[in-house]
Amino acid sequence: MGVIETTKQRTERAAKVTPQDVRALLPLGQILDGDCIEALRSLPDNSVDCVFADPPYNLQLGGDLNRPDGSEVDAVTDHWDQFDSFKAYDEFTKAWLIEARRVLKPDGALWVIGSYHNIYRVGAILQDIGFWILNDIVWRKTNPMPNFKGTRFTNAHETLIWASQGEKARYQFNYRAMKTLNDELQMRSDWVLPICSGNERLKENGTKVHPTQKPESLLYRVLLATTERGDVVLDPFFGTGTTGAVAKRLGRDWIGCEREDVYRDAAYKRIAKELPLDESALTTMQSKRAAPRVAFGAVVESGLIKPGSQIFDKKRRWFATVRADGSLECETPKGKLQGSIHGVGKDLQGAPSCNGWTFWYYQDGDEMKPVDAARELYRLANED
Amino acid sequence: MGVIETTKQRTERAAKVTPQDVRALLPLGQILDGDCIEALRSLPDNSVDCVFADPPYNLQLGGDLNRPDGSEVDAVTDHWDQFDSFKAYDEFTKAWLIEARRVLKPDGALWVIGSYHNIYRVGAILQDIGFWILNDIVWRKTNPMPNFKGTRFTNAHETLIWASQGEKARYQFNYRAMKTLNDELQMRSDWVLPICSGNERLKENGTKVHPTQKPESLLYRVLLATTERGDVVLDPFFGTGTTGAVAKRLGRDWIGCEREDVYRDAAYKRIAKELPLDESALTTMQSKRAAPRVAFGAVVESGLIKPGSQIFDKKRRWFATVRADGSLECETPKGKLQGSIHGVGKDLQGAPSCNGWTFWYYQDGDEMKPVDAARELYRLANED
DNA sequence: GCGGACGCTGAATCGGCTC
DNA sequence: AGAGCCGATTCAGCGTCCG
């Protein structure tokens, strides 16, 4: 299909323009007025890191809806047809998703939130046009509205879809920050968060400004998990600007689209009051992947683990001699093994792979310690 | 679209045959062999009350996955989960959904379970052909498989869609039984249940018979919520027969479709061992007036205290039968008492009030334990 | 017999860089 | 572009075995 572009093609096209060039063209910190699809069309290709979208849920869309060709959908009839309505909603959804995909960088990610009324339409279409679902997330509301008539289950959750540009596309996931946030357990796909109420809920003369204002805690988790400081977040259905407020607080840049004056005004006021967190607050836990790489040889060279000494696995089943260049030598019944701490560990266990840093131990006085402890010491001693 | 029939048309067509006529034509308690769509075609129109479907998820897994300790994950690589494309999967999905819709009575309901790999396809298609979504339900797993590589959120839930035949169609919802089961709070759209493991998991020579066996507690809640005694439940992807086993226990009739001999054999054996709960256990709370004040249902659902079993006071002066929704029934010289554990305890003693949790005991092996002990166990197993 | 250590496993779209 | 290498990464539940 013509709308689908491979990750490779996108990467090549993106490479023609430098990131600095593109960033300079972006209306950072602005809310684009007018129709969302038209507004998206004004933005350059491959230019934002994250799209967060909270599209309309209602399938009886009234005058809010234009087909991709610009014609207006007449959905307001007494006998409006369910199937016509799905068709119109699908066209609208496909149009904004295609624009979002164009604007998003090849290694950017899309978030969409919805309920059972629309999320199956949205999910199927985003898969159709080439997005690759990474997770779906359930926002479990601590305080949902009850089902007053007792006719169904209390609708106590909404669904978010997180998707990359394609199956092979890269994406940002701050694993360590999420694990830290969740009490040292992996963050799960179900998030328990209260709905937006109290002081956080924007009100004008006692009535809520926007009917579906999302809680900041939800955006906080989304942005902390899948963006970095300085990233650009685009929200095509900006409303009263929850995305912008949280982005500003977390040191991310933002762009919004919103056609209603009332919402835009409220959002600008709200975001102006928001203060970015300072440097130290924004520093999050980094995974080992992001730590500077240290060769085992450097640890040996530094003397933390001595050449000629023996290292061994936790149960002392295997012993190996450390050589001057950081390679290992190990006598086995089947012959002599030699190689890296990883390779020898792998071969000894007959495993598909091995992290030598945690597999091997060395003797330090009375204690045995994983060689990873020596790497830690090395990093501390050689910090910039 | 040709495949769509209005609720009115369906009702008129159904009226030509009496319910007794249709029921006599049904292969109750049988697992139909062969292709699911062909098998469904052999069933008459408008004849079953509920369809529960656990279709292939179309996982599209890449290479092997190893745990951090090097062991290999036993993934779902069965041939029945392989499809060439979204298009092929969609065609398959539409075909079985259309047949399910034809077989289902006009006031029947459909349940489908899936993950993010397939549920958006399924949800959009069932809307397209005229089903009307009543709720989506999130099964939050207490013990999901972790994300070993630290690349995404732990995939800790699956999604169920519950749909009627159309926007105006009637459907069965046992509101009172659900509220009783949930400690006198409305049952929510997120259900916290463990995955199928331990003795419940069917094994042959130490290996699991089916890679994706669902927990009985999940089917228990589905059938208790949306079917009545004597209803016919059809499962087009029967597997090892969880739907049939729970249907039999709850006094519902069932029909299955399954093309794998191994699964059919295991299912027949399993269901043969299952005993239906007796009359009193199956009588659930119907009206508000008879409503028990307390929540004992979740303990019953979890299997810690079995529906149909007897509980008794410390001195074994009184005995009561536990019903499927957590209410009690007790024969006395003065007549039959029914209600919550608290209400029945109170009436038996002629006391102004009674804490049923400490009044009632259940037999656990050789020991008798207060039902509060089972509540403790339940809390421990379901801590948030 | 009991408590703790250890082992196994579950619907999973589960790397990234260099050469 | 594919192969090779480096090395990061897991939670709850249940069963078994050992002291």
Image (cartoon, coloured by chain):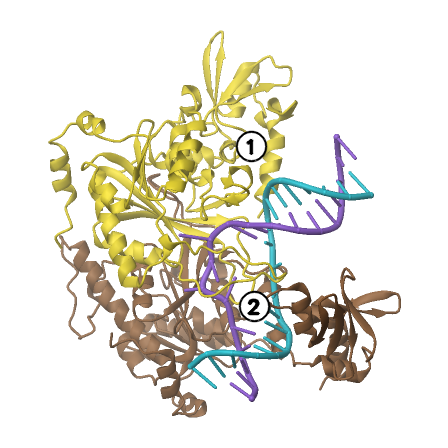
Chain colours: A brown, B yellow, C purple, D cyan
Q: Position of residue B5 (x, y in %)?
A: 14, 46
Q: Position of residue A219 (x, y in %)?
A: 47, 67
Q: Position of residue B226 (x, y in %)?
A: 34, 36
Q: Residue at x 25, y 46 (%)?
A: B37
Q: Quadrant of residue A90?
A: bottom left
Q: Mark 1: give few (<14), some (14-19) or many (20+) Cα within 10 Å.
A: some
Q: Quadrant of residue A301?
A: bottom right
- Looking at the rendering, in which quadrant would you find the C terminus of chain A? bottom right
Circle 2 — which element? helix
Q: Mark 2: give few (<14), some (14-19) or many (20+) Cα within 10 Å.
A: many
Circle 1 — which element? loop
Question: Left or right: where does residue B18 sit relative to residue A336?
Answer: left
Q: Chain of mark 2?
A: A
Residue type, mark 1 in image = Leu
Please name the residue that numbered disc 1 is placed on: B304
Please name the residue that numbered disc 2 is placed on: A175
Q: Position of residue A67 (x, y in %)?
A: 19, 70
Q: Is residue A26 visible?
A: no
Residue type, mark 2 in image = Tyr
Location of residue A146 with respect to A230 vertically, above or below: above
Question: Left or right: where does residue A312 sit relative to residue B145?
Answer: right
- Front position in the image: B99 or A56: B99
Question: Left or right: where does residue A349 sit relative to residue A186?
Answer: right
- Front position in the image: A3 or B66: B66
Q: Chain of mark 1?
A: B
Residue A201 numbered tag: none
Q: State how far apart marks 2 and 1 are (Cα).
A: 37 Å
Q: Residue at x 47, y 72 (%)?
A: A245
- Looking at the rendering, in which quadrant would you find the N terminus of chain A? bottom left
